[in-house]
Structure formats: structure tokens, C-alpha cells
Amino acid sequence: MLDIPELADSLDAWMQAIGLESAVLIGNSMGCQVIAHLAVRHPERVERAVLQGLTMDPQGRTVLRQLGRFLTNSTRESLSMAPIMMLDYLAAGFGRAWRTFRYALRDHIEDNLPHLGVPTLVVRGSRDPIVPKRWAKEASRLLPHGRLVDVPDAAHTANFDAPLEFVRVIRAFLNERQPRENEHGP
């Protein structure tokens, strides 16, 4: 069972194994934590980063708060997301899912964000209770080259809820020639 830094090292090893020197990385939820560690531990691997549904909010870093936010979010997600999530949790197994969740709770992404030297886009669904607007703004301010974009009417999985808008904001971010330092958006 790998913790968050070990998952980042595994991603680095996979990139090495396939000959991928660097890439633009897009993470969702806990994947944002993995990308943040990768960008700090192996900065040569990350050209730009997109952190969508950024976890873990320092003010919500308890099992009860996260469970409450998860349950609230479940009522806001598309109904077609439920079977996908259930199959993922069943495939992983309850024990592994629980341990991974605990690793994510203990990981302080806010300690890594100031050390990401690449342009980074924080994307948040406007209806995401897991990532409060306050936390998304704070996280984007911690990034040396960070910017925040809200995807209207999307919950935690904006990439699933609003894929066309998600692609549009990423495409705009990737087409920028120079990083816009600390542009935090709405």
C-alpha cells in the first residue's frame, strides 16, 4: 500500500519506464496531492499542472468533515457518476480505499504548493463542497504561478460533470505563452 509520496515516486518511475521525460499533468482530487509531490520531488517531470478538485482542505482535514462533504457532494454529482465510483471502490477494496483516504488526510498539500515552480491551474466546480471556494483561493495563492478557475454548476468531479468546460479552461491555460503569476480569478 503506497502513501502519497510513494505514489508520486511510482508515477516518476512509470514516466521513466515509458520514456516520458516531462508532461503536463492533470490531477483530480487526491491525484492533485500526487502531482504536487511529483512536482516537488521530481520537478523535471512536470511542465505544467492542473489541480482539479484539490484536496485536502486544511480546515476540513478530519474523517467526519470529509465524510460530511463527500455525502453532500454525492447529492450534487451526476447520477451516472455513482456506478463509476462504486465500481472503483469495489475494485480497490474497502481496506485499500480506507488506507488511501487516511494517507490523503495526513498529507499536507499546502506545504508543497509554494514549491511548485511550474504554471499551475487550480480548477474547482462551483458546487463542490469538498473544496470550499476559500480553500481553492488559498491554494492558488500559495502557488508561485497559480491561477484559479471555477467551472459553473459542477460538483467535485468537474472533469465528469462539465467535460467541455473543463477542456476549454485547460486548453486556454495550455495556450498561454507566459505564466500569469498569482492570478487568482473569482
Image: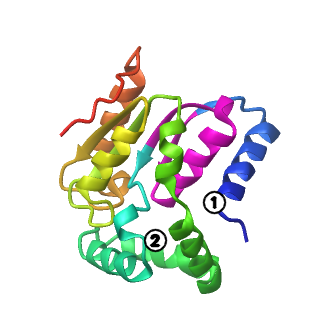
User: Disc 1 to disc 2, how far (Cα)?
Assistant: 23 Å
Counting from the top left corner in percent of width and height, residue 170 is at 37, 34
Q: Nearer the viewer, residue 4 or 92?
A: 4
Which image quadrant: the C terminus?
Answer: top left
The answer to if 45 sits in the magenta stretch is yes
Q: Is residue 162 visible?
A: no
Which image quadrant: the N terminus?
Answer: bottom right
Q: Residue at (45%, 58%) from the top-left corner? A: 29
Q: Amino acid at mark 1?
A: Ile
Q: Label 1: how many residues lie within 10 Å, few (<14), some (14-19) or many (20+)?
A: many
Question: Which residue is situated farthest in the top direction here?
Answer: 177
Position above or below: 38 against 3: above
Give the mark nearer the N terminus: 1 vs 2.
1
Q: Is residue 78 visible?
A: yes
**Which element is circle 2 on?**
helix
> According to the image, label 1 marks what residue?
4
Counting from the top left corner in percent of width and height, residue 53 is at 38, 55
Question: Seen in the image, is 69 located left or right of residue 116?
Answer: left
Q: Residue at (64%, 44%) from the top-left corner? A: 38
Q: Label 2: how many residues lie within 10 Å, few (<14), some (14-19) or many (20+)?
A: few
**Which element is circle 1 on?**
helix
Q: Residue at (18%, 55%) from the top-left corner? A: 153
In this rendering, the count of numbered labels is 2
Q: Which mark is residue 84?
A: 2
Q: Nearer the viewer, mark 1 or mark 2?
A: 1
Assess whether mark 2 and mark 1 are in contact (beta carbons under 8 angstroms): no
The answer to if 157 sits in the magenta stretch is no
Q: Nearer the viewer, residue 73 or 106?
A: 106
